[in-house]
Image (spheres, coloured by chain):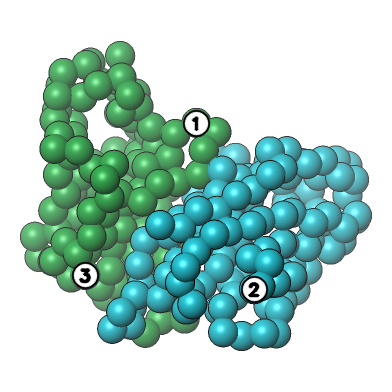
Amino acid sequence: DTGVSQNPRHKITKRGQNVTFRCDPISEHNRLYWYRQTLGQGPEFLTYFQNEAQLEKSRLLSDRFSAERPKGSFSTLEIQRTEQGDSAMYLCASSHDGGSYNEQFFGPGTRLTVL
Amino acid sequence: AQTVTQSQPEMSVQEAETVTLSCTYDTSESNYYLFWYKQPPSRQMILVIRQEAYKQQNATENRFSVNFQKAAKSFSLKISDSQLGDTAMYFCAFMKHASGGGADGLTFGKGTHLIIQP
């Protein structure tokens, strides 16, 4: 298993454009999480899925953000009408129910820059 | 809602020294987990050590150990015999025990930038 992967690793876009990020969790991990990390801060929880069901959404997840996990495997995070304040590192993590301490394994992140 | 506070933005020690990173948290939950994550420069976050709130014994993983004071809501990380490869951002994180088992979202502190000098 190669761990959690995220694509693209870097994305530069202009304000007002839509962007979509992809996360592939560790195989057979049924839980998948999205976090956002701005410069000099710790990651902030956005949302998480158990299989294909989105179980929790943070207040940080505005109407412009949408996340899906259609078949309970990979997930996508879409940001519509991007704003400069959306510039951040977007981290994905996965875990397995019943796994050791419910440990979350993180991917390398997608760094978004909105010009 | 939970909060996690790391009061040391940056620390610097010499190689082979022992260093302690502090973390305090606030919660009304009684059943939860605490973690220390390491984020090396331009690399992904990895778990260093974890503690279940109901366990009184402090967790230890090789050179890493914690001092968990539940009543004081304190969770410090001690790194013994520090190595150059320990240079990284260290994040303290809280996770409540989700109902029905399984995991919940993590609440992170702002991090401590640890620099190990040769």
**In the image, which lettered chain appears green?**
A
Look at label 1 and name its amino acid: Leu
- Which is closer to the viewer, label 2 or label 3? 2
Chain to which mark 3 belongs: A
For mark 3, what is the residue? A50
* Camera-side residue of A91 and B84: A91
Q: Residues within 10 Å of mark 3 (few under 14, many from 20)?
A: many
Chain to which mark 1 belongs: A
x%, y% of residue B109? 55, 49
Residue occupying image coordinates x 31% and y 58%? A33
In this view, the residue farthest toward the left is: A70
Q: Which mark is residue A39?
A: 1
* Camera-side residue of A73 and B48: B48
Look at label 3 and name its amino acid: Gln
x%, y% of residue A44? 40, 46
Quadrant where the image shows the C terminus of chain A: top left
The Cα–Cα distance between marks 2 and 1, rounded to whole angstroms, is 30 Å
Left or right: B117 as drawn, with respect to B73: right
Answer above or below: position of B98 versus B22. below
Q: Residues within 10 Å of mark 1 (few under 14, many from 20)?
A: few
Tell me which corner region of the image, top left, top right, bottom left or bottom right, holds residue A99.
Answer: bottom left
The Cα–Cα distance between marks 2 and 3, rounded to whole angstroms, is 30 Å
For mark 2, what is the residue? B70
Chain to which mark 2 belongs: B
The Cα–Cα distance between marks 3 and 1, rounded to whole angstroms, is 29 Å
Answer above or below: position of A44 versus B18. above
